Image (tube, grey):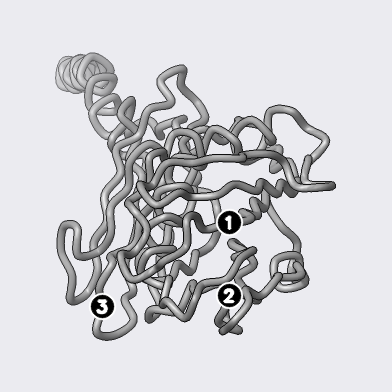
């Protein structure tokens, strides 16, 4: 009986030793995977609205790594590739033609950790006029036509001019105007487009300086980098088209709509 008990105790001892030896790797195998410390946050949040052919600055803030680069992608129901818009250098540009409003998802993926992503919803609305003599342009407040249009429809022409200036302005916008600082400011610049598309008489409008030289320079350089513009429409018999451009950095509600727009003379 004693020998059987001794044999049984020896067997239990060996089993316990075997469990101790095998237990550690088994526990290690069942441990949950480490959570990534990288976090991506897109601004603006939680969504943004852009008119057809319009553009919007988008910023992706990456925390938890020294590699802050991200890869952008966009997809939506009923659109693909550039049909959903394009994004480059932090500037989203909406499609120029739509038959109905578009909803798409814009995603930023961390290059340091592809599992770290963030997305926002982009709403692209139907076209609206940017013609300065149209009442809708007063609400937009981007361009004032300061001279006689002589009955010529400058809508398509000014749309192209506005698109080029906006894109070059956004690409030169200083960091302080971007999240998280979001510096505010208003700049107004006057100039004339000559028949061949060249620019003359460029100057800051009276009271048109923002008080921040970096904001002023970005707006100024946005126009300079867009030169020359397309030639003025052939049906326009004037020698030049005088304009005033308004640049709004992170405006409050009502800032743009409250801007006084000088309507061109109509003959």
Q: Which secondary structure lies at badge 3?
A: loop
Q: Is residue 152 left or right of residue 187?
A: left
Discs 3/1, front = 1
Q: Residues within 10 Å of mark 3 (few under 14, many from 20)?
A: some
Mark pair 3, 1: CA separation: 31 Å
Mark pair 3, 2: CA separation: 21 Å
Q: Is residue 191 left or right of residue 150?
A: right
Q: Position of residue 203 (x, y in %)?
A: 68, 39
> Compared with residue 106, is residue 2 higher up or lower down, i.e. above or below?
above
Q: Residues within 10 Å of mark 2 (few under 14, many from 20)?
A: some
Asked if residue 121 shows in the view, the reply is: no
Q: State which tag comes first along the sequence, 3 or 1.
A: 3
Image quadrant containing the C terminus: bottom right
Q: Position of residue 58 (x, y in %)?
A: 47, 47
Q: Position of residue 142 (x, y in %)?
A: 60, 62
Q: Is residue 139 left or right of residue 171?
A: right
> Compared with residue 136, is residue 167 higher up or lower down, i.e. above or below?
above
Image quadrant containing the N terminus: top left
Q: Which secondary structure lies at badge 1?
A: strand
Which numbered tag is attached to residue 98?
3
Which numbered tag is attached to residue 137?
2
Residue at image coords 49%, 72%: 130
Q: Position of residue 207 (x, y in %)?
A: 84, 47
> Compared with residue 104, is residue 242 higher up or lower down, i.e. above or below?
above
């Amino acid at each position: 009986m004693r020998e059987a008990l001794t044999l049984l105790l020896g067997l239990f001892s060996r089993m316990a030793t075997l469990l101790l030896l095998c237990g550690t790797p088994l526990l290690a195998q069942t441990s949950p995977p480490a959570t990534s410390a990288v976090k991506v946050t897109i601004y603006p949040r939680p969504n943004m609205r852009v008119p057809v052919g319009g553009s919007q600055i988008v910023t992706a803030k990456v925390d938890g790594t020294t590699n802050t680069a991200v890869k952008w992608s966009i997809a939506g129901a009923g659109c693909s590739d550039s049909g959903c818009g394009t994004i480059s250098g932090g500037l989203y540009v909406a499609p120029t033609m739509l038959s109905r409003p578009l909803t798409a998802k814009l995603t930023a993926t961390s290059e340091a950790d592809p599992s770290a992503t963030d997305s926002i919803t982009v709403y692209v609305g139907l076209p609206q006029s940017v013609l300065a003599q149209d009442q809708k342009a007063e609400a937009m407040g981007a361009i004032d036509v300061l001279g006689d249009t002589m009955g010529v429809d400058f809508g398509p022409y000014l749309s192209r001019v506005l698109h080029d200036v906006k894109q070059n302005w956004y690409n030169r916008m200083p960091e302080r105007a971007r999240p998280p600082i979001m510096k505010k400011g208003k700049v107004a610049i006057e100039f004339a487009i000559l028949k061949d598309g060249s620019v003359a008489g460029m100057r800051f409008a009276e009271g048109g300086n923002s008080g921040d030289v970096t904001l002023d320079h970005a707006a100024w350089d946005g126009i300079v980098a867009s030169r020359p513009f397309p030639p003025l429409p052939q049906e326009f018999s004037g020698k030049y088209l005088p304009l005033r451009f308004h640049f709004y950095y992170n405006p409050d509600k009502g800032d743009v709509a409250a801007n006084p727009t000088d309507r061109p003379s109509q003959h």
